Amino acid sequence: MIMLDAAVATDVGLVRRSNQDRGVAGAVLCAVADGMGGHQGGEVAAQTAIDTLQSSFASQGGKEGLEKAVRDANRAVWERSLADEALRGMGTTITAATIDPNGAGQLVGVHVRDPRAYLPRSGSLERLTADHTVVAEMVRSGQLSPSEAAVHPGRHILTRALGIEADVDVDVWEVEAVPGMRLLLCSDGLVNEVGEEELSSVLSAASSAAEAASRLVEAARLNGGNDNITVVVADVLEDASGIAQHRGGGEAPASDPSASNDGFFEPLPPSTAEAPGAAKARRSRGRGSRRITLKVVLFLLLLAAVLGGAVAAVILYNNSSYFVTLQNGRVVIKQGLPGGLLWMPPRTVERTTLSESKVLRSNLAGLKAGVQEPSLAAAKHYVHNLVTEYNELPILPRTARPTTTTTTTTATTTTTATTAAGG
Ligand code: MG
């Protein structure tokens, strides 16, 4: 019988205050959820998704059961977010895998997010799946070239997540479960920090799933740890009887990362005096590792989630924020926040012909830092006020530069041009 020997390792990282990732590493079901949403939203979304996934899967397993469990999880997160004002807009990405008992040992996975599946071929990793990111879809529709996409600030923005809508598109993948295969499920906190080459070498070198998981988390921390990091590594084994004893039960998922940390603390070198069941499990894992190295049957599924924050909410917030600032000596209106918000740099939406020299000196410091306005209309109104203030106070020192031209002509030109300026 084909089973999984899986381990989860998770870490808050070096930047985030809370861990909004959740991971499950069971003998039958493995999953990673990366929550998003302000305050407690991300944690609630990920935990709700994992709890629902597990309870739904417990009543129906296999491929259909897993797909249904993900839909149920989506519905649970969605309903919870509707029921609680403070959780509105929360969501989570999720990826899960199981062994389908109906097939001849099929490894089945589902995902709702930016999934990446790789197969190593002649020393490099071959990409198996397409991204569900905004940028990936722009490339497919010809709006962006692949090289533009690689540096696009929106490259991590997903087109799908769990809990954002009542129903969700679930992608299903299926591969033959070959003993010795090693599967990786992870949040984007891993793949954003650790390159494919390093991932591949850690996965093939580690002697157990637990060792691989904890080493990968460590690598992500060493490379910056900018996000929560959650890694589930699952080894496909032929005989799981040893695992069941070793782990004190077949399905023993660790859903609470703070409590489990299975990947961190499991002792790596096997002790010489072990229960017979444990020894059997070790041998199975050892065989699996050798197969990975010798036959190069390494199957990596990298599921890159979004930046941990509330993607939908953050984008909405960013897009509804405007500020007036100076650019190349001219007043401009930008969408977003001064200095940018997470991965989103501010975007110029209105260029005006109002030059810095036609702005009162008292307004310059604020403009340089960026004057925030609640809407585009309010930002335009602010620009008009700049012009009006300049015109109404002709005697005060207006700019750093001496002004010798006639005020009336200049101001009229400026006002007209500003009104006509468009993005
Ligand atoms: Mg993340």
Image (cartoon, helix red, strand yellow):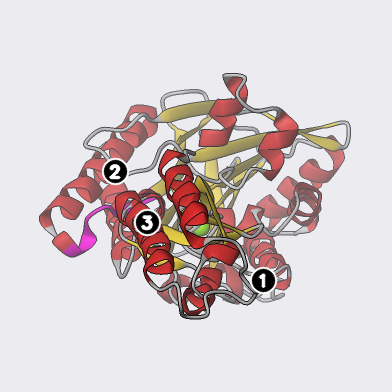
Residue picked out by circle 1: 221
Identity of the residue drawn at 60% across and 48% down? 153
Q: Earlier in the sequence, mark 2 or mark 3?
A: 2
Kind of residue sitting beneath label 3: His
Check disc 1 and report its element: helix, strand or loop: helix
> Residue at image x 58%, y 67%?
263
Name the residue carrying label 3.
Answer: 384
Disc number lying in front (2 or 3):
3
**On the picture, is 38 further left or further right than 414?**
left
Side of 376 where 208 appears, left or right:
right
Q: For marks 2 and 3, give the CA distance.
A: 39 Å
- Judging by the rendered image, the residue that carries numbered circle 2 is 164
| Spot occupied by residue 157 in the image (x, y as percentages of width and height) | 50, 44
* Residue sitting nearer the eye, 209 or 255: 255
Whether the magenta-drawn stretch holds residue 395 is answered as: no
- Res 213 → quadrant: bottom right
> Closest to the observer: 344 or 402?
402
| Image position of 308 with respect to 148: above or below | below
Q: Start and end of the magenta stretch? A: 86-92
Q: Is residue 364 above or below residue 105?
A: below
Q: Work out whether residue 305 can be spotted.
A: no
Q: Let me know if residue 87 is in the magenta part.
A: yes
Q: Residue at x 40, y 73 (%)?
A: 393
Q: CA distance from mark 3 to mark 1?
A: 49 Å
Q: Residues within 10 Å of mark 2 (few under 14, many from 20)?
A: many
